[in-house]
Every structure is written in C-alpha cells, then in structure tokens.
Image: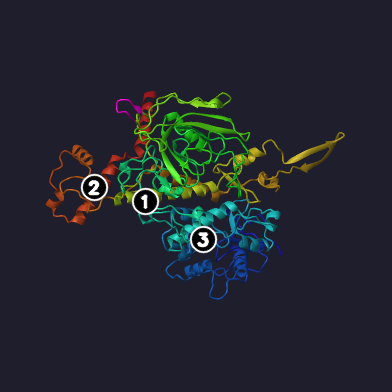
Amino acid sequence: MAQQLPCDNDGICLICKTTPSSDQTLTCNTCVTPWHIACLAINAQSSSSNLWECPDCTTLVDAGAPAAGEKSELVAAIQAIEADATLTEKQKARKRQELLSGKEAPANEKEGERNEVADMINSNFKCCVCIQLPERPVTTPCGHNFCLSCFQKWTRQGKNTCIKCRFSIPAKMASQPRINSALVAAIRMARMSMASSTGGQLKISHFVHNQCRPDRAYTTDRAKKSGMANAASGRIFVTTPCDHFGPITAEYDPVRNRGVLVGESWDLRMDCRQWGIHYPPVSGIAGQAKYGAQSVVLSGGYEDDEDHGEWFLYTGSGGRDLSGNKRTNKDQSFDQQFESYNESLRFSCKKGYPVRVVRSHKEKRSSYAPETGLRYDGVYRIEKCWRKVGKQGFKVCRYLFVRCDNEPAPWTSDEHGDRPRPLPTVKELKPAVDIFERNESPSWDFDVEDNLWKWKKSPPVSQKPVRDGKPEDIQNARIAIRKAEKTASKDKLLKEFSCLLCKNVMTLPLTTPCAHNFCKSCLEGKFAGQSFMIERSRGGRTLRSQKNTMTCPACPTDISEFLQNAQINRELMDLIEKLQESSKEEADAPVEFPAASSEDPVKENESPNPQVEAKTVEENPEASSEDPDKENGLSNSEAEAKIVEDKKRKEANAKPPPKNKKRKVNNDNLLKDENAS
C-alpha cells in the first residue's frame, strides 16, 4: 500500500510537494488535518467533507478498537465535543485540536488535585497516539514519545515516519524499539504521586514514637529473623541529641535526675544506645567527618589495639572487605585512610573534644575490660593520631586516647577524677607516617581554679536538636520536612535526567535511537573532528568512500545517521527547565508557618510581635491608637478582610513597578540625544 501523508502547516502536500487549493483538500473530522485528495490512495470524493476521517485516525481507531463497554477515553471525549450543541463548528475544531495535542486532559484526569511534579510530567509527556502517559515509553530521534504498543501498531502498518512531525524513523528502531529508562522512572514517580493525591493506597510507614517504645530493645513482627540483629531500639531515656559531646549530666536525665555515671553497665549495645552513651548499634565509632567523634567502643575488633587503662592506642575503621556475606571478616585487605569515621576522630583530636569510651567484654586482650556486657568508663581526649603498618601488613589509622574525666575510673580506688598527666611514650611513632598533633588549645581542658575538667571553649552546636514537645514547634517542623521532601523529589527526578557522559543534568538533551540520553554538547564533543565518511585510496587510486561507524557511548549501536541531523528532545528539555525553575523558587522562598491560634496566651492589648507593631506606627505616625474598625462598626470577619486587603496594598506599594527601570533608561537615552543635538 502506498504511503499516505497529509499537508504540512504551509499547506504543501508532503507527497507531490504542491500547494492544493481548498477545493482539492479534505479536512479530517477528528484531527483537523488537511489532506490532498489527488494523493489519497482511497476514493475520498464520495465521502462527506463534514464526517470524513483521515487514514491515520481511521487506522488507529480500527487497530486499537476497544471492546463493548470499554470505549477509549479519547474517542469518548471527541464524541462529547461533537454532541455539544452549544459550541460552534470553529469552537469544536479548536477543542478537538487541543485535546489531540495534549493541552486539555480528559475529564477523569481533572478529578482531584495533583501535585506539581505529576502535573509537570503529565503535561510534558504524552503518547502521540493515545494521548496518555506512555506505558513502556519509546522516544523517537525527533524527541516524541509513544507507548511501546502504540509505536509497534504504527510501524507494523509500514509507516516509517513520526505520527506527529513526519520525521523519518530509522529502520532498525522501527523493528527493534528500545524503552527509554529515564522516562520510565519519571512516569513511575508521576503515577505514584497521582495515586497518593486521589486517595490511593500509600506506602505504609512503620514508626513508633519514643514515648510509646518499651524500656528494652525488642523484635517486631516484621523482622525476618529473630535475635538482636533485627531488634528495634527501646525508649531513649535521655534528652541529649545523638551528636552530643561529653558526659551525660543530670540535666539531660529526666527519669533519674542524675545523669549517666562512670561504671554503669548494660547487657547489650541497644541498652547503651538508650542512655545516649553510644548510639550506633554495630559501628564502634560514633561521629561525623567534619563535626567530630562523640564516642567509641573497645570491643577487640583489631589486634593492633593496646589498652593501658588511663590511656590506650585505638585502631580506626576500614581496610576490610565486608561485601556479600563477609560482615564478620577480620582479614585486612587494603590500607585505612583518614576519611569518614577515621576523619571524625582526627577532627576531635584537632579541636580537643571529649570522647566517651565504652569497653566491651569482647576485648579479651585487655585487663580493663568488663567480664560481661558493656561498661561506661568516662571521657577521654585524643592527643595524637598517625598511620603505621599494622600486624596484617596494611596501614592502619592509630589514635592515642588519654583519660580526662572528673569521676574516678572503675578500676581505681581513688576518690577524685583524673589530673593532667604527661603523655606516654609511644614507640611506634618513629616509623609512623601522617602524624597529626593538636597545635591549638583544647576545647575540653582542666581548670586549675575550679579543680575540674570542663569546656574551655563553647561546645559544638548540635546538628540534630531535640524537640521540646511544643505542638507549634512540631507542626512547624512537619511543614519544613514536607517542603524538604517535595524539593528532594524534584532533585531526585532531575538526577534521572542526567547525561551519561558528564553525569550532570542535561542541557539541550538528545535521545538516541537506542534510547540513551546525552547533552548535545557532550555527544557532539565525543565525536568532534570525525567525519561521517572515510575517504580511501590505495596505490594512488581513489576508492569508494566508506561510512564511518560512530558507536553510542553507552552501547554498541551505530548512531552516525542520527548525528547527521540530531534533533533536540523538546519535551524533555521543557520538563527539565520547569523542574529547575520550581526547585530554585522553592529554595529561595521562606517557609511559611501557620499563624498562632486564638488559644495562644496573647494579651488583649499586647502585640505578638512588638517590633512589627513599632515599625508600623513609625511608618504611619498619624494612625490612631484606637481600633478604627470598632468605630466603623465592622464585624470580625469584615475587619479581618480589611486587614488582609490593607496588607496586600502596602506590599504592592512597597514593590517598585518593573517598568521604572526601563523608563529610567529611556529618559537617560533622551537626555543623551538632547545633549548630542
């Protein structure tokens, strides 16, 4: 069957390249596209011009005709437009065109409020055939999207051009279409958000408030295996944040009002966590690389450790292959570096922060370890750190801990705590490398006047503050969290649209026939300086030119023909720009917290914000101190509406009109012209 093509936007037939008159064309009743009668393969002269449908619309409806009672939503929407007697023929044609172009969604998609990300994706990505979100999306080299089934129905009819722009589809892509994985993630996110906004089934989040937790660690019914490896933490008894430095004093212990004392013991690491001494249930170091380490556990994990009670040599973390089922692998396979937890210990050494130390019964080589469970032994300070070759032949990070607590150690009979002592001699420092020693004064030091250890400098501000339980603070925190989650979803979606070469968000995106996405500059730069044809010669003779094979950077597919006329994916580019603009606006906009309720304890004649009230009076000194709304006899609702209108009017007057700058420039230009004349 001969290929059938309509007329383009200029009225030129895409087959005979002539411009037929209005008498020689037929307009499709569904898609309102003009067709040249002489170039149509079927006899369209006998068809009524008002009810005639083009070959594209007829083929698509026949090929994908739904069963009885399952009529297509698109066809139903078009029939509803035709049956509307209040519309003129011109208005009907405009509504049909908007519906087919995707500017107007079917009625069922307008039910319920959709979130912003879903609206962006739903408006930018539509299958060119069914005008719905593509199912298993296929992107043509011209940047238009199809469902995989719709694309296969179209190409099986022998049509090798895009249904929307008539751009040629490569033969290999028509026979073996590839699914665009970047669009799959975006459409999945849109459908999940649409399901949540319309009351669909949401993902269940299992969360138990601290006050509802039991006093000991427990195993939930959702745990795949029994035992403490799958246990959940019990109730946290102290009010310190998880990044608190130094001892846990009585002010942070509302249960016992005494704090955590040196020598207290627990059976499990989870119990130790509940009293804020050491939070990680598995890791031996609690800390952050650029913030410092709060606590460590001596559990005999590395054979290089040396414990001398008041001071000990501690080995950092890492250097072992823990992939797969090697969680308990104790063989070191590479060098340790000052990064992550190791860097947090070095940061505490630099600042002189106190580090809480817990000794475990698993440390069998130490004389100071408890017989059972875990024991809190007070705070230590890291004086030096370095790297040396360990007993297994690889470099390890080493730290010198010296005790500096106001309470006596559990293994001594002293009545007082530690006093400043000279540093011990460490023999392994001679062959060591990367030696670091604190040069500045420590933050936690001994005060001679008070005869105790205390903070000489301000302790680091917590990055994870504890809520004080006020309802308004909890509500404000929830609003901030929701805004962060909304921004995070957009950032996550932008990461899906990353170039496979530069790993950044794409600019001027190109989608290859093999369904890989690149920046235009990155893809063209990859093949810069290469010609599409290779000139050959042998023995002075010129041979036939050979096609240069240009393989896709992500797969072995030849994309040389695509590169000769690469088309920017406009739909993808529009979505990326909208997401970037929306993320930037949300980042710049302040968080709007709800106003205080009428139940708040605010006095009748007292303003909740005296600075704002003083500023208002200063700006308007003629304002009366009495309530003008009471004099005018306004009700409460009318008074509130008036306040809102006045506020909007003041904000509008405060903002300069955007045309002032342009008007000023024009005036300057006029002055220059007058001076010149």
Q: In the image, what residue type sits under mark 1?
A: Arg
Mark 1 lies on residue: 478
Q: Earlier in the sequence, mark 3 or mark 1?
A: 3
Kindly identify which residue carries mark 3. 97
The residue labelled by disc 2 is: 646
Question: Three-letter amino acid code at disc 2?
Answer: Asp
Q: Mark 2 or 1, which is nearer the eye?
A: 1
User: What whole-number distance in Å separates the C-alpha atoms at marks 2 and 3?
Assistant: 44 Å
Residue extending farthest front? 413
Q: Residue 353: percent from the left, percent from the top?
A: 41, 32
The part of the image, by quadrant, that contains residue 208 is bottom left
Q: Report the amino acid beneath label 3.
A: Gln
The picture places residue 113, in percent across and down from the top left corner, at 41, 59
Mark 1, residues whose alpha carbon is within 10 Å: few (<14), some, or many (≥20)?
few
The colour scheme of the drawn protein is rainbow
Mark 1: secondary structure: helix
